[in-house]
Image (spheres, rainbow, N blue to C red):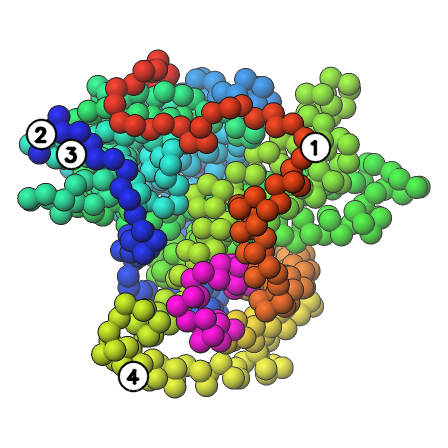
Amino acid sequence: MSASTTPSSRPAVTEREAREVAEAAREQHWRKPSFAKELFLGRFRLDLIHPHPLPDEELAQRGEEFLAKLRDFVETKVDGGLIEREARIPDSVIDGLKELGAFGMKIDTKYGGLGLGQVYYNKALALAGSASPAIGVLLSAHQSIGVPQPLKLFGTQEQRERFLPRCARTDISAFLLTEPDVGSDPARLATTAIPDGDDYVLDGVKLWTTNGVVADLLVVMARVPRSEGHRGGITAFVVETNSPGVTVENRNAFMGLRGIENGVTRFHQVRVPAANRVGEEGQGLKIALTTLNTGRLSLPASCVAAGKWCLKIAREWSAAREQWGKPVAHHEAVGSKISFIAATTFALEAVTDLASQMADEDRNDIRIEGALAKLYASEMAWTMADELVQIRGGRGFETADSLRARGERGVPAEQLLRDLRINRIFEGSTEIMHLLIAREAVDAHLSVAGDLIDPEKSLGDKARAGANAGVFYAKWLPKLVAGPGQLPASYGEFKHGVDLSGHLRYVERTARKLARSTFYAMSRWQGRMESKQGFLGRIVDIGAELFAMSAACVRAELLRSQGDHGREAYQLADVFCRQARIRVEELFTRLWTNTDDLDRKVVKGVLSGTYEWLEQGIVDPSDEGPWIADATPGPSQKENVHRPIR
């Protein structure tokens, strides 16, 4: 097909077709055990996470040495307040990070990288992000989802040798999937890659390209049309940003993370060598999802850093600020918030370190664990930051510059709240994560009984599925009746002063209850189950709490066995588990007692204009204009704001 061929318009996609595209991109098989998958099936496999896995000694030494250098750099060279005020990371800081090797943390040493494992990579991101969240995002977007990770997993040896040394020391990379009218529904992807000889020709527009404004290399997802010799489908390419036809049309600005280099990138007749295609045609979404299995763990790392800072500020402020004759920390209304921050920070670090070490060991399939860590950390960190602002009162709402100008300590609590808000949206919004995790959690059920609830399957298919399901459930359901969680002596090794064994028994019992609830719902709603997003979200949230409780207990026991604040760790794990159990019981109640059906009726009324009268009495400060910008392929009409850093 000629390069001059006009790119196809945005594909019209039905709901079923969209699901099929997403399903095809999933990893279809479970070749390794998964703690979280087993948990959703009602099987508490503590043996998969306890004793807590530990880093290799050589990796740990290498990681500690780098952390020491990075700490010195961010303490002496990074001014987080300046980055916030100017909404830009100084080039000198980026150059310093390059010299330090921070852009090659996850790249193998044979390609010039530092070869850190996921555990120390996350610790480094947490440290850098505590100095400036924008720096954490810069490094994470480059290595977690940018060029290095897809090439590590799916690239050819020649591609690794060409691009990884550049990514390790000199070049910044970005990942481009989202489009102005395409978010979590990639089946509608409109950017095209038309085969032309030994090249592909890219046309389209990408939105929210984190690092895109300064990137030298891009991972671009584009649709290849099916044709003779080309299977087609969404495909990944490495694109040089300085290629003719690549234009960064806008540097976007946000409520938080003001220093990030996020833009809009247009491709017009951009020639990309076939040698730059990552994987096969049609593998693009699978590459993206597989990359995110571990890539998502960088976000919980930033949330852990946020929790630690919230705890530090809450402790110092609440001891210094007095109300009614005593420090505010001693008032129960404030003290409960401090307890929540301390216990939750401990649990988030436990979840992040456990999932990261499991990723390094590669013994387990952590696709659900990584997704749960992202989901749980983003929600809990936001709540902790909100509680810190409340503890600080009016000062929490005041900017650090304003506090400093009137003679007080410049504490950027309101900035933290703004910076953390995006975590509930990007790399999979909370709502999308609920659906993604729910799909994985019910995979075993769909594998044996999926054809039973598929209206398009034949009677023969349904009969075979019924037979398979009968065999599976005859073995599985009886195991949900009783287990170690009902035996008082179970998990006795977690009893040292503070008794955590009861919490683990609770997790085991509740995992079985969760599995029974899921099975009941599938029996009740069958094919309509996928539309019950409120129910599925609560199922996933219960699983997330159980995972966090398990991780917290295992981490407490690890610290105790190492003689490293074990007594205090047990106390924090105990408090966290008690708080989590309250949340779990509330979620179970809301599985069956909720307003989901009424909410749907109200939504129909809102969209039909039934309640439009309720909107009267205001003025709308929004500008006139389209809700979604025009992304018609063609040459750019705007100035190129691409700003490579050299």
- Give the image location of residue 510, x and y in percent: 56, 72
Considering only order in the chain, which callout, 3 or 4, is on the residue closer to the N terminus?
A: 3
Identified at 27% across, 42% down, the residue is: 11
Query: Can residue 304 be seen by looking at this rendering?
Result: no
Q: Mark 1 and mark 2 in contact? Answer it, CB < 8 Å.
A: no
| Distance CA(mark 3)–CA(mark 1) | 52 Å
Return the residue nearer the eye: 386 or 117.
386
Task: Find disc 1 in the rendering and name its residue.
Answer: 617
Callout 2 crowding tier (Cα within 10 Å): few <14, some 14–19, many ≥20: few
Callout 4 crowding tier (Cα within 10 Å): few <14, some 14–19, many ≥20: few
- Give the image location of residue 344, x and y in percent: 63, 52
Task: Find disc 4 in the rendering and name its residue.
Answer: 467
Task: Find disc 3 in the rendering and name its residue.
Answer: 194
Q: Mark 2 and mark 4 in contact? Answer it, CB < 8 Å.
A: no
Secondary structure at badge 4 equals helix
Residue found at the very far right of the displayed protein: 325
Q: Which residues are magenta?
A: 517-542
| Distance CA(mark 4)–CA(mark 3) | 46 Å
Identified at 32% across, 69% down, the residue is: 454
Query: Disc 3 marks which amino acid?
Result: Ile
Please give left or right for residue 370 compared with residue 188 in the image. Answer: right
Secondary structure at badge 1 equals loop
Considering only order in the chain, which callout, 1 or 4, is on the residue closer to the N terminus?
A: 4
Identified at 33% across, 28% down, the residue is: 631
Task: Find disc 2 in the rendering and name its residue.
Answer: 2
| Distance CA(mark 3)–CA(mark 2) | 8 Å
Q: Mark 3 and mark 2 in contact? Answer it, CB < 8 Å.
A: yes
